[in-house]
Amino acid sequence: MNQTPVQVWRIVATGALFVAWAIAAHLGSAGVGSAGFNAGVAVLPLFVALGALLWQARSLAVLVGGLVVALAAVVWAWPQLRDNVPGLYYLQHLGSHLALGVLFGKTLWGPGDALITGMARHIFGNGISERKVRYTRQVTAAWAVYFFANALVSTGLFLWAPLEIWSIHANLLTGPLIALMFLGEHLVRKRMLPVHERPSIVSVVRAYRQRTGQAASSEPASRS
């Protein structure tokens, strides 16, 4: 599938932003640069995540009110935040990994498909084989274990290792480690599944967007 120039530039810009943020997070955790700037860079993703969460309520009042309350809390706690920049990045890293671990892991219990099994159904339709159901369930479990294990490693390094070592792991290696997981799963998939049951990367991304988009739109409806 060919990418349009706009899509290519969007991918490049996203990658560049991620790399720049990772470098800024590493330098900020090491105490390089202005403490205020470093604290601002650390807090900004939390506001983005909070905004995305509040947006699911489909209410401008809830969105604006929540962000105003969060901003007031940051202003009130700013002196403590500015003096504990590494702790902010640690909470970011821990929270994101725990949230992703729960996102994958909770679909392994109760009725319904595991997360990646549901993505496979989006790609191939409901007629996927039992072999693929088992495989995608195992991959879902592997991702859940990865996120929880990485959260545990991050906590251990933050508590007992030099701060620079923890920062390299949390801020610089998070992206490469996830890419390594994708590569490892791709190699295992080639050995475990026949060609006609292997989705392309583009299909996986499209299925993930559809699945998360449907989940986001169904939650407000279920509350109304």
Image: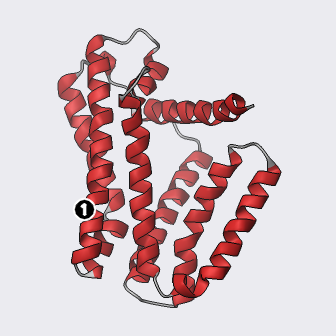
Q: Residue at x 62, y 57 (%)?
A: 50
Q: Quadrant of the C terminus?
A: top right
Q: Is residue 78 left or right of residue 149?
A: right
Given the current orientation, which residue lies at the most extreme top position? 127
**Residue sitting nearer the eye, 137 or 192:** 137
Residue 204 in the image, given as x and y percentages of width and height:
44, 32
Instruction: State the SS at label 1.
Output: helix
Q: Would residue 58 appear left or right of 99 to someone viewing this image?
A: right
Amino acid type, residue under disc 1 in the picture = Val
User: Which residue is drawn at the image coordinates 48% and 70% (left, top)?
Assistant: 21
Q: Which residue is mark 1?
A: 153
Name which residue lies at 37% across and 12% down: 128
Residue 64 placement: quadrant? bottom right
Residue at 72% across, 43% down: 57
- Residue 131: % across, % down: 25, 15
Residue lying farthest to the right in this orientation: 61
Residue 196 or residue 188, whichever sits in front: 188
| Residue 193 versus residue 2 in the image, above or below | above
Q: Which percent across, then down, holds residue 223?
A: 70, 33
Tell me residue 67's x, y (percent): 71, 63
Callout 1 crowding tier (Cα within 10 Å): few <14, some 14–19, many ≥20: some
Query: Does residue 219 show up?
Result: yes
